[in-house]
Image (cartoon, rainbow, N blue to C red):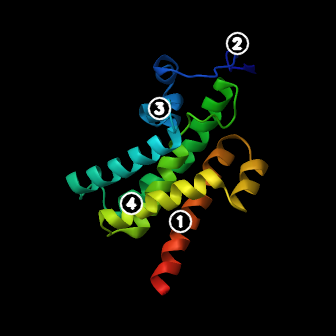
Amino acid sequence: MTTLESGQTACVTKPNARFMLSHPAHLLAQGFGSGLSPIVPGTAGTLLAWLSFNVLTARWPEWFSTLHWAIIIAAGFVVGIWACRKTGRDLGIPDHGSMVWDEIIAFWIVLLVLTPSGLSTQFWAFLWFRFFDMVKPAPIAYFDRRFKGGFGVMWDDIIAAFYTLLVFALWRTL
């Protein structure tokens, strides 16, 4: 159980579209519905990030240039802290599995840094990112336990993105 700003208590173990649409923070934190996937919602959120990055960049390159993506990602991280904090509080679980905005922002970072890259490179980046996000090797697990609230939800995925990019940096030096 958790206390909402209105003074009511809530504990939603299985959020649905009604919950997601009840507040803009929920819609964002739950990745516009991708986090409501009944199986592997984090993977669904990462797939949404991959698809949206490629579609938006190809369709509107003047609006989704490298600089614009960097601004979108930075703003998305800051807004994501608020959205994930609010949604986690309303769900009664600070890092509920349906919250996938952290995966979206982190994977956009990976795709932005790897640009330009083909689908094969992006596929391997997807696999490595999901691996690091699910396994949570040190220090990801440390940050996941240590930092709570919206910042903690967002930060551990940024570290997973860093690990993914580190794999590619090491691969390119070999």
- Which badge, 4 or 1, comes first in the chain's sequence? 4
How many marks are shown on the rendered structure? Answer: 4
Q: Which amino acid does label 2 sit on?
A: Gln
Q: Mark 2 points at which residue?
A: 8
Horizontal and vertical percent position of residue 51: 33, 48
- Which badge, 1 or 2, comes first in the chain's sequence? 2
In the image, taking residue 58 as reference, residue 125 lies left or right, namely right
Instruction: Measure the alpha-carbon separation of dots 4 and 1.
Output: 12 Å
Under circle 1, the secondary element is: helix
Q: Name the residue under label 4.
A: 123
Instruction: Measure the alpha-carbon separation of dots 4 and 2.
Output: 44 Å
Q: What residue type is labelled 1?
A: Thr
In the image, taking residue 162 as reference, residue 109 lies left or right, namely left
- Which badge, 3 or 1, comes first in the chain's sequence? 3
Residue furthest to the bottom in view is 174
In the image, is residue 58 above or below residue 37? below
Q: Nearer the viewer, residue 137 or 18?
A: 137
Q: Mark 3 points at which residue?
A: 37
Horizontal and vertical percent position of residue 31: 46, 37
- Which badge, 4 or 3, comes first in the chain's sequence? 3
Instruction: Measure the alpha-carbon separation of dots 3 and 1.
Output: 24 Å
| Crowdedness near tag 1: few (<14), some (14–19) or many (≥20) residues, C-alpha within 10 Å | many
Q: Nearer the viewer, mark 1 or mark 2?
A: 1
Query: Residue at the location (56% across, 57% down)?
Result: 131
Instruction: Measure the alpha-carbon separation of dots 1 and 2.
Output: 41 Å
Q: Which amino acid does label 4 sit on?
A: Phe
